[in-house]
Image (cartoon, rainbow, N blue to C red):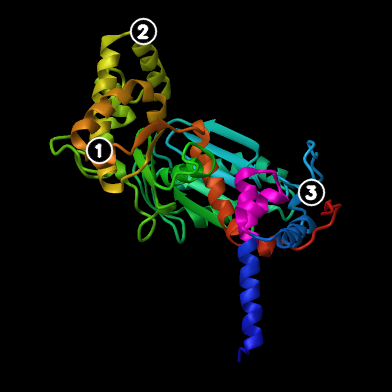
C-alpha cells in the first residue's frame, strides 16, 4: 500500500530525475556552462543546481572549476565542464559503399572515428556485421570500463525500431534482417543497441549539433544510390507506428518511370539518386562517388552536358521537395549526402519547381540548405541515439566512481 508520505517521496524522486535530465541535456548539447547559465536555462534555483551538479561530479561525469571574474562584481560562478570520456557512445553506420564507427563522448566530443570504403553490391548481413565489428573493436577498447552508454546503428533501410529488425534495405539486398540481435551477439557487450534508419538519425544529428539547432520543424533529405528522409515536427522526430516513416525516396512521382529496387516503379529515387544523375550525364550508372566528383568538376568547367544533368535532377528534386513542403510545412529542408555535394548546382532548379508546385504559405517559410555536419552526419546521429536513455534519465549512471573528483565551492 502506498501511503501519502510514500507518494510525496515518489514525486520528489520524479522531480529530481527530471532536473538531472535537464542539466545533462544542457551540458551535452552546449558543453561547459557556468552554474549561473544552468540556472537560467533550466529554471532551477542556485541551491538546487549546486546539489545536482554535486551528483554529476561525484560520478565523474563533470568537473567544476572557478571561473575568472573578468572584473564583474560578486563571486564568479563556477564552470561545469563535461568529462568527455566518462560517458561515451559507440556510433556505427552501414551505408551502400562504406562502413563507419565512431566513439563519441558526453557533450559530443569525437574521440575516434574510422570509415572503411567497400565495394558496392549485395553482401550477406553476416559478412557486413563481421566487418563492422572488426572496424568497431579498436574503438571499444578505448572506452574505459563502465563508461559505454550504448551503441547506435544507422543503416540505409527500413528499420523496425523496437527490436532493430531491418525489414527492407533494397540497396544492400536485405529483407527481414535481425540486425540489432546480430550485433548484440557479435559485439558481446552488455549495453543497449539501438538501430534506426540513417536519414532519421541525420535529422537528429543536425537538430542537436548542426544547421537545425533551434529549429522545431525540419526535414533531412539524404541521397546516394537510394534516397531517405527524416522529419522533425514540433521539435520531435516523426518515426511512424514501427519506425518506418520517412521513406520519401519511394514516393511515386513518375508513372512512366523506371523500376525501383524496392519492387515498385517510378519512385522518386529513380529520378534523383546517384544512378539517375550519372545516367543523365551519359556516364556509368555505377561510377560511384568518384564519378560524381568528376561530374562536379565538369560542371564547374562549364560542360553543358554536366550542367544539363544537374538541371534535370534538380528539377525532379524540386518536385519531391514541394510535396515535403506541402505536407510537413518545415522551416528547413536539409540536404545530406549526395545532395549536399551537388547543392550549388541543383538549388536553382529546386527553387524554380517550388515556385510552381509548393503552396505559397509554406514555401515562403522554408529554407533549403546543405547539411552542416558533412559525411559523418548519420554516424553522429547514431551516437546521439545511443545517448538518449542517459539524457532522459541520468540517475542510473550517477553512482560515485573511484578516482579524484573536483567540486568547486559556491
Task: Give the percent coordinates (x, y) of residue 299.
Answer: 34, 13
Task: Give the percent coordinates (x, y) of residue 180.
Answer: 50, 55
Query: 291 or 272: which is nearer to us?
Result: 272
Which element is circle 1 on? Answer: helix
Query: 329 or 124: which is nearer to us?
Result: 329
Task: Please tell me whether the stretch drawn in magenta is mainly helix, strand or loop.
Answer: helix
Quadrant, the N terminus: bottom right
Q: Is tag 2's residue or tag 1's residue first in the polypeptide sequence?
A: 2
Query: Badge 3 local density, few (<14 within 10 Å), some, or many (20+)?
Result: many
Tag 1 and tag 3, C-beta contact below 8 Å? no
Structural distance between the alpha carbons of marks 2 and 3: 54 Å
Q: Is residue 25 magenta?
A: yes
Determine which residue is flagged by label 2. 301
Examine the rendering and report whether any part of residue 220 can be seen: yes
Task: Give the percent coordinates (x, y) of residue 203.
Answer: 44, 43
Q: Is tag 1's residue or tag 3's residue first in the polypeptide sequence?
A: 3
Query: Badge 2 local density, few (<14 within 10 Å), some, or many (20+)?
Result: few
Task: Give the percent coordinates (x, y) of residue 244.
Answer: 35, 54
Structural distance between the alpha carbons of marks 1 and 3: 49 Å
Structural distance between the alpha carbons of marks 2 and 1: 30 Å
Q: Is residue 163 left or right of residue 139?
A: left
Determine which residue is flagged by label 1. 322
Specify start and end residues of the magenta stretch as a single range: 20-43
Which of the 4 image quadrants contains residue 132?
top right
Q: Which mark is drawn over residue 64?
A: 3
Amino acid at each position: 500500500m502506498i501511503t501519502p508520505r510514500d507518494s510525496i517521496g515518489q514525486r520528489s524522486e520524479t522531480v529530481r530525475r527530471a532536473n538531472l535530465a535537464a542539466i545533462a541535456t544542457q551540458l551535452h548539447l552546449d558543453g561547459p556552462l557556468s552554474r549561473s547559465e544552468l540556472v537560467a536555462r533550466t529554471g532551477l534555483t542556485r541551491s538546487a543546481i549546486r546539489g545536482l551538479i554535486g551528483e554529476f561530479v561525484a560520478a565523474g561525469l563533470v568537473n567544476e572549476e572557478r571561473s575568472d571574474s573578468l572584473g564583474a562584481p560578486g563571486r564568479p560562478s563556477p564552470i561545469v565542464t563535461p568529462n568527455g570520456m566518462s560517458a561515451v557512445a559507440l556510433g556505427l553506420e552501414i551505408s551502400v559503399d562504406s562502413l563507419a564507427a565512431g566513439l563519441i563522448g558526453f557533450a559530443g566530443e569525437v574521440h575516434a572515428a574510422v570509415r572503411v570504403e567497400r565495394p558496392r553490391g549485395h553482401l550477406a548481413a553476416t559478412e557486413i556485421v563481421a566487418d563492422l565489428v572488426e572496424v568497431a573493436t579498436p574503438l571499444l577498447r578505448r572506452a574505459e570500463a563502465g563508461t559505454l552508454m550504448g551503441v547506435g546503428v544507422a543503416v540505409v533501410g527500413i528499420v523496425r525500431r523496437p527490436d532493430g529488425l531491418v525489414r527492407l534495405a533494397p540497396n544492400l539486398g536485405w529483407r527481414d534482417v535481425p540486425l540489432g540481435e546480430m550485433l548484440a551477439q557479435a559485439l558481446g557487450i552488455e549495453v543497449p543497441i539501438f538501430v534506426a534508419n540513417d536519414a532519421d538519425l541525420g535529422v537528429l544529428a543536425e537538430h542537436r549539433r548542426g544547421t537545425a539547432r533551434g529549429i522545431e520543424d525540419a526535414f533531412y533529405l539524404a541521397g546516394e544510390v537510394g534516397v531517405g528522409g527524416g522529419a522533425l515536427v514540433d521539435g520531435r522526430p516523426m518515426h511512424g507506428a514501427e519506425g518506418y516513416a520517412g521513406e520519401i525516396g519511394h514516393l511515386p512521382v513518375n508513372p512512366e518511370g523506371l523500376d525501383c529496387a524496392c519492387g515498385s516503379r517510378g519512385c522518386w529515387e529513380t529520378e534523383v539518386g546517384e544512378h539517375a544523375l550519372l545516367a543523365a550525364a551519359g556516364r556509368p550508372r555505377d561510377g560511384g562517388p568518384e564519378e560524381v566528383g568528376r561530374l562536379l568538376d565538369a560542371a564547374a568547367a562549364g560542360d553543358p552536358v554536366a550542367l544539363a544533368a544537374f538541371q534535370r535532377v534538380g528539377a525532379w528534386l524540386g518536385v519531391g521537395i514541394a510535396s515535403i513542403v506541402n505536407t510537413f510545412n518545415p522551416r528547413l529542408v536539409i540536404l545530406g549526402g549526395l545532395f549536399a555535394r551537388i547543392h550549388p548546382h541543383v538549388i536553382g532548379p529546386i527553387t524554380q519547381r517550388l515556385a510552381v508546385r509548393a503552396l505559397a504559405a509554406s514555401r515562403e517559410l522554408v529554407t533549403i540548405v546543405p547539411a552542416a555536419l558533412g559525411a559523418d552526419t548519420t554516424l553522429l546521429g547514431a551516437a546521439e541515439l545511443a545517448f538518449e536513455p542517459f539524457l532522459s534519465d541520468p540517475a542510473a549512471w550517477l553512482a560515485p566512481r573511484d578516482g579524484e573528483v573536483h567540486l568547486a565551492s559556491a
